[in-house]
Image (cartoon, rainbow, N blue to C red):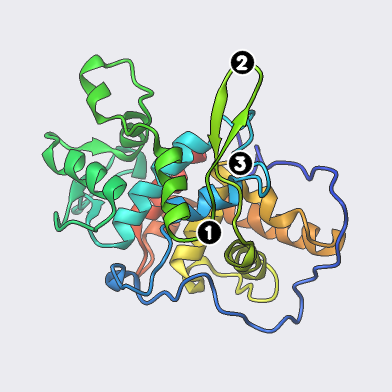
Amino acid sequence: MGRSEGLVQRRNVAQTSNSSHGQEEENAPYVEKEEEDGDSKETRFTLLEEVLLLGLKDREGYTSFWNDCISSGLRGCILIELGLRGRVELEKTGMRRRLLANRKIICKNDQPTGDVLLDEALKHIKETQPPETTQSWIEYLSGETWNPLKLRYQLRNVRERLAKNLVEKGVCTTEKQNFLLFDMTTHPLKENTIKGKLIKRVQESVLSRWVNDPHRMDRRTLSLIYLAHASDVLENAFAPLSDDDYEVAMKRVRDLLDLDFEQETMKDGTCELMWAVVSAFSK
C-alpha cells in the first residue's frame, strides 16, 4: 500500500464557509513549549486526548463503530508522547544506519509523567529486555499479538480512560445510552470551544500556516496530523472546510504522507521516534 493510500475520502457534509486563508492566528488548545520541556503544566492535552476528541461525535459522545484504526492509532500516540517528553528514544545506530523498522525503543528517563496511561506504557518499555521495535510495541500495547507472553503489555479500556480525562478537564460529560441489546456509557461534548480550537489548529497547520517543511512545523501538531490520519479521524477536522480549502488541505497531507521517513530521520533536530511511529503506520 502506498503511503498516501488509505486517505479517507470526504463524506457528504453540510457546507460551511470556514476558509482558513488569511485567518488571524488564534491560541491553540494548549500553549506548547519545546518538546524537551514537554512536562510543562501549560500543556493541557496529550496527543491521545486530542486524537480521541477529534474522533468523538459531538452529541452522541462515542467514536464511529466502523473505525477499526483508532485503537492502534492511540498506541502510536503513547509512543510519540513519551518521545516528545524525553522518556523514550530509538536506540543509536552507530556507523551503520539501520532502518527505522529495525531499531528498538529504549527507556531514556523513567521519571513518571503524571499520566497513568503514559506511565503504564513507560514501565513496560523500561522492564522489557531485550528492547522491542516500534511496530512491536504498537501491537503489544493494542493486544494484537499471537505471543501469549506479550499479552500482559496490553493497555485496556484506553478510550474510556481518555474520555474520563476529558470529562475531568471539563470538555465532555458522561451519559448512558441504550442500544437495544446493551447500555453504553457515552461522553458528549460539554462545550465545543476546546474542540473548535483544536480543529482550527489542525486546519491552519496545512492552510494559512503551512510552511512546506515538516521540520519547521510544530512537532506536536505534525504528530497530531499523522496520528489523526492513522486513527481515521483527520477527516473530522477537515469536513467543515470549503471545497477549495479542503482540496488544498488534503493535498498537503498527502505530501506529508509521501515523505521519505528514513531521510527525514537523518535531519538535525528531528524526533526519530515520531518518524518511526509514522513509518510503522505507513506500511
Would you call the spot at circle 3 few (<14 residues within 10 Å), some (14-19), or many (20 or more)? many
For the residue marked with disc 3, what is the amino acid?
Asp
Name the residue beneath numbered marker 3: 232
Q: Is residue 258 visible?
A: no
Image point (62%, 67%), residue name: 193
For the residue marked with disc 2, what is the amino acid?
Leu
For the residue marked with disc 1, what is the amino acid?
Val
Q: In this picture, is 152 found above or below 64?
A: above
**Residue 276 position in % (x across, y down):** 38, 47
Name the residue beneath numbered marker 1: 171
**Residue 133 position in % (x across, y down):** 28, 37
**Residue 10 position in % (x across, y down):** 78, 45
The quarter of the displayed image where residue 64 is located: top right
Q: Is residue 179 visible?
A: yes
Q: Which mark is residue 181?
A: 2
First in residue order: circle 1 vs circle 3: 1
First in residue order: circle 1 vs circle 2: 1
Q: Is residue 108 left or right of residue 157?
A: left
Q: Secondary structure at mark 1?
A: loop
